[in-house]
Image (cartoon, grey):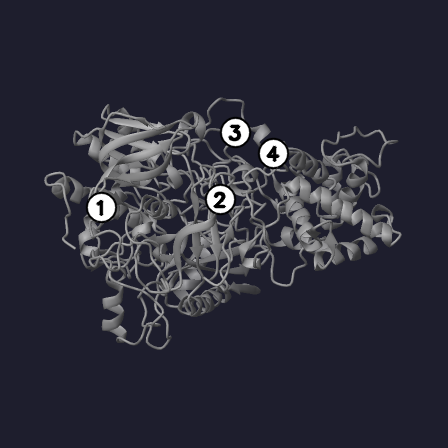
Amino acid sequence: MAQRLKEVDVVVLGVGFVGSIVAKELAASGLKVVGLERGDPRDTVPDFQGPYVHDELRFAVRKALMQDNTREAVTFRNNAGQTALPVRRWESFLPGTGLGGAGVHWNGQTYRFQAADFILRSHVEERYGKGFADPELTIQDWGVSYADLEPHYDRFEYLLGTSGKAGNINGKRVEGGDPFEAPRARDYPTPPMKEHYAGAIFRKAANGLGYHPYPQPSSNLSQPYTNPEGLQLNTCVFCGFCERFACEHYAKSSPQTVILPVLLKNPNFELRSGCQVQRINLDSSGKKATGVTYIDAAGREFEQPTGLVISALFSFNNVRMLLLSGIGAPYDPATNKGVVGRNYAYQTMSSAQAFLDESVNINPFMASGASGTMINDFAGDSFDHAPHGFIGGSYIGAINTNGRPIEYHPVPPGTPKWGRGWKEAVARHYNHTVSMTIHGSSMPRRANYLDLDPTYKDAWGQPLLRMTFDFPQNDLKMAQFVTDRAVEIGNAMGAKVVAGSPRKGPYTVTQYQTTHNTGGTVMGADPRTSVVNPYLQCWDVPNVFVIGASNFAHNASWNPTGTIGALVYWAIDALKNKYLKSPGALVQA
Amino acid sequence: MAKISRRSFLKAAGSASVLPGVIGTGGLGVAAAAGPAPKTPLLFFTPHEAAFIEAACARLIPFDELGPGAVEAGVPNYLDKQLGGAWGAGERLYRSGPWQAGTPSQGYQLPFTPAELFRNALRGVEADLKAQGKVFAALSGDDQDAYLKSLEAGGKDLNGVPSELFFQTLLGMTVEGYFSDPAYGGNKDMAAWKMIGFPGAYASYYDLVDQHGVKLARAPMSIADAPPMEHMHQGPDIPAKL
C-alpha cells in the first residue's frame, strides 16, 4: 500500500541536465519542487576524485556510470516480424543513471542544429520538391523555429561556458567558425580549445580540399569561466578521460558543475534519490495528472501528489513513462495511428581511419571529449542533395577524444585478429593514426518505433521498453556518400592506408555507436503526429510536460545536447510566462 | 616512447620471468611448481583449466621483441580474478527469461553468466581435445594456433556454448587484461602500456597538446602510482613532464 505524501507544486522526474535546470528555475520562482532521481546522489567531491576515476576497465568497458541492466533493460528487434529480445548488456547505446544523468559522463560536444532541421519537411519539399524524400520517412516540422530557440541555445551555452568559435553572428560570416551554422546572436562564451595534432592534420587536409574546418564546440573549457549562476569552471587539462567518465577537474560542464549547487541550496527544492517512478497518476477523466507513484531504494511505495509533472528523463524513459501511465495514444505502425513511440530515431555513425607514417606522433591520449577539428560541408543541408537521392548528412571530424588502449588500438584492414601479427600492428599504429568520426543524421521511418514489451519486465515488474529499429535506406546511402568524402580527406593527409567504414545495415545492438537515441514523444503543431505541443506540454494531459531528446521529430547531424538545452529553456519560458499564469492547455488541439 | 627493446623489457621485467617456456609471476604458475617464482593463487580456474587458459593466452598475445605477451603481463591472473568475482557472476547482465536464440543483431541471449560460460566451454574444450587425443599445452605453437582457429571459426558446441562465442569472449577479456590498469592483475609493470606508448591513468597534457608530434618519453603512471592524496584536482598549473 502506497504511503500518500503531502502535495507539492511540482514533481520533476529525473535529475539530469534537463531536470536540474527546470527544477532550479521553478524553485527559484517560489514553487515547491521535488526531484525524483532513481540513481545515487553524487558530486565532484568526493565521488569523482582520484585515483579511481581514471580506470578504463571500470568506467569505459564495464560501464560503471550506466543504468544497471540487471534491473532495467530494453528489448530490441530490427522489424515487427521478429520477436524482440532483451539487450542483456549495453553495447550500442549506454543509458546513464544517477544524479546529473548523462550530463556527468558526456563528452561535452555542444552543437546547435541548422535552421532547416526545425522545418525539415517544409524545407526539403521547398528545396528539392515534394517527391524527393523517400516516402517511408516520416519527417515533419517541429512546431518551433530556429529563431524561436536561438536565445535559449545562447542561454544554455552560457550556462555551460562552451568553448568555440562562431561562424555566423547575426548573419555576418566570421572567419574560422562554421560557415554553415545558423546565425547566433553572439560568440561562444569562451574561445576554442587548443587544437591537438590529429585536428591540425585534419585541418590542413580539409583546407586543401576546399572545405571549411573549424574547432569543435566544447563544454570542456578552454579557460576558467564563471557562469551566470555564479559557478566556476576550470581549464580542461586534456587528460583524455571524458566520455563514460566523470570529470574530477571541474573542467567539464555537467549538472554538478553548472547548476546543481545552486538548486540544492534552494529550500524550495527537495532531492529524493534512489526513487524509481512507476507511473504518473491521472484523475478519472484521464486528462489531469494528480501525482506520481514511486518506490524508494528500500522497496517502500509512495504516492506524491502534485499539480504539475515534468518528465525530464532520458528519451527511452520519457516514452516509457507515458506508456506506463496511459498518457497519449501508443503509436501503431500498422495503422500509422497513435503518437507515443513514433519517430524514434538514432544517429548514423560511420568512421574512417588514416594510418600515417611511424614518424608522426599523434599522441591520441592528449585529448578532451570535444577538442576535435571538423567540417560541416556534408552535414545537414549544407550541400545540394539533388544529385544524391538522400536527405540529411554527417559532420566529419578528427575528434579523437582519447587514447585509452583497451578500446582504442586501431589496426589497418587485413590485420590478424590475434597473435603476433595483431600485436605488431597494434604497437605500430597506436600512436600514428588519425581516426575520423562521421556523425550522421537519422531520419524517422514508419516502421521504427518504441512501445512496451509484451514479455520482458524490469525488477519492479513493469514491462520493458521495446525498440523496433533498422536504418532507413536513405541514411545508409548518406553514410556511404559522406564516408567516401572522409576517405578522400584521409588520402589528402598523406596516409599510406585509409580505411573507411560506412555504416551498414542491419542495425545491431552489439557494437557501440552512440547514445543519441531520440524521438518517441515528438513535439509538433499537429496532435495527430506529436505527443507534446510546441511548448513541450502533453496534448492530452496539460499538467504534464515532457522534455528531452524524445521531443526530436528526427535526429540531425549533430550531437543532441545543445538542442536539448535550448528546448529546456524554451519550455521554461513558456512554463513561467504562460502556464503558471494561467494553467491549462497552451495550444488548443 | 614508441616501444621498448627486448633488452630493456627483459631488464624491466626480470629476465627469468620472460624466457620462453618458463611461467612468470604474472602467469598462474601451475606449470612452474618447481620454479622459484611465487605462485599466483587460483580463485576460479581449476589447475587443469588454468593450463589451457595460460597456453591459449600465450598464443593470443605472444611474447616477442616488442614487449610482453599476455602471460608475462599477467592476463591469466586477470581472467581468474574477473571470473571469480562480480563480473563472472553476471554483474550488469540482464538475466530474466524466457531464453531464445535471436538474430546476430540482437546480441548475447544465453542464460550463462561469464563464469558459467567459461566453465561449460572449458569442459567442452577438454572433451573435444580428449576425443582427438590431444593435450593443448603440449601441442606445438602452430598446432595450438590451428586449434584456436577451429574454435574461432565456430561450429563446435562446447557444452551449450558456441565455440566462436567462447573464443571471442576469451580474446576480448585477454585484451582487457592486457591493457587495463595493473590493479586488476594484468598489464604487469604497465608493460603493455609501455609497448604502445600509452602514458597511463594520470596526466595533464595542457602544455603538450599543441606541441604537435612531441615524443612523450616519460614512464606511465597507474592508479597505484597516483600521489597519495585524498582528492586530486589537477590543473594547468601542474606541468606535464616530457
Q: Position of residue A380 (x, y in %)?
A: 33, 63
Same chain? Circles 3 and 4:
no
Q: How busy is the neighbourhood of tag 4: few (under 14 within 10 Å), some, or many (20 plus)?
A: few
Name the N-terminal-most of marks 2 and 3. 3
Mark 3–mark 4 Cα distance, whole angstroms, equals 21 Å
Q: Determine the secondary structure under disc 1.
A: loop
Q: Which mark is residue A366?
A: 2
Residue A341 vertical position relative to residue A384 in the rendered view, above or below: above
What type is the residue that disc 1 sits on? Val
What type is the residue that disc 3 sits on? Pro
What type is the residue that disc 2 sits on? Met
Q: Which residue is mark 4?
A: B86
Mark 3–mark 1 Cα distance, whole angstroms, equals 48 Å
Residue B71 vertical position relative to residue A499 in the rendered view, above or below: above
Q: Position of residue A451 (x, y in %)?
A: 39, 53
Q: Which mark is residue A29?
A: none
> In the image, which is nearer the foreground, mark 3 or mark 4?
4
Q: Which residue is mark 1?
A: A541
Name the N-terminal-most of marks 3 and 1. 3
> In the image, which is nearer the foreground, mark 3 or mark 1?
1
Note whether residue A227 is visible.
Answer: no
Q: Is residue A79 left or right of residue A391?
A: right
What type is the residue that disc 4 sits on? Ala
Q: How busy is the neighbourhood of tag 1: few (under 14 within 10 Å), some, or many (20 plus)?
A: many
Q: Determine the secondary structure under disc 2.
A: loop
